[in-house]
Amino acid sequence: MRIKRAGFLTKLVVLALIIAASVTLLRMRGQIEAAQAQREELRMRVATQTQTNADLRDAIEHSEDPDRQIEIARSKLGLVTPGEKVIVFTD
């Protein structure tokens, strides 16, 4: 039995399909890399937000603690305790 060789048009169509598939794969690879970078950024944001939530939960749980209230007031208002020395850096 004799096998008929592929014609020029068939070879051209197969070549075009291979080129199209290669271009599509390269685009998909770029999209995958972009999605992975975005995923990593979102993981970092989730970790930061989780820490913020834990800090807020701790603040709520200890909101009745007088020492905690004094510490918060000192940090937010810039207050100092008697006898504490304050060093101010200026440029």
Image (cartoon, grey):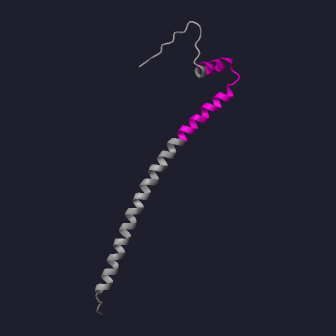
Q: Which residues are magenta?
A: 46-74
Q: Residue furthest bottom?
A: 1
In the displayed structure, 91 sits above or below 13; it is: above
- The quarter of the image holding the C terminus is top left
- The quarter of the image holding the N terminus is bottom left
Q: Residue at x 56, y 6 (%)?
A: 83
Which of the 4 quarters of the picture holds residue 10? bottom left
* Of 41 and 6, the residue lying toward us: 41
Q: From the viewer's perspective, is 65 left or right of 15?
A: right
* Of 9 and 80, the residue lying toward us: 80
* Of 2 and 82, the residue lying toward us: 82
Residue 63's spot in the image, x, y percent? 69, 25
Which of the 4 quarters of the picture holds residue 74? top right
Main structural element of the magenta stretch: helix, strand or loop?
helix
Q: Residue furthest top?
A: 83
Residue 15's spot in the image, x, y percent? 32, 76
In the displayed structure, 38 sits above or below 79; it is: below
Q: Residue at x 60, y 23 (%)?
A: 76
Count of number-bearing discs: 0
Q: Residue at x 57, y 39 (%)?
A: 49
Residue 37's spot in the image, x, y percent? 44, 49
In the displayed structure, 14 sits above or below 24; it is: below
Q: Residue at x 60, y 31 (%)?
A: 55
Whether the magenta-drawn stretch holds residue 69 is answered as yes
Which of the 4 quarters of the picture holds residue 79? top right
Whether the magenta-drawn stretch holds residue 68 is answered as yes
In the displayed structure, 1 sits above or below 43; it is: below
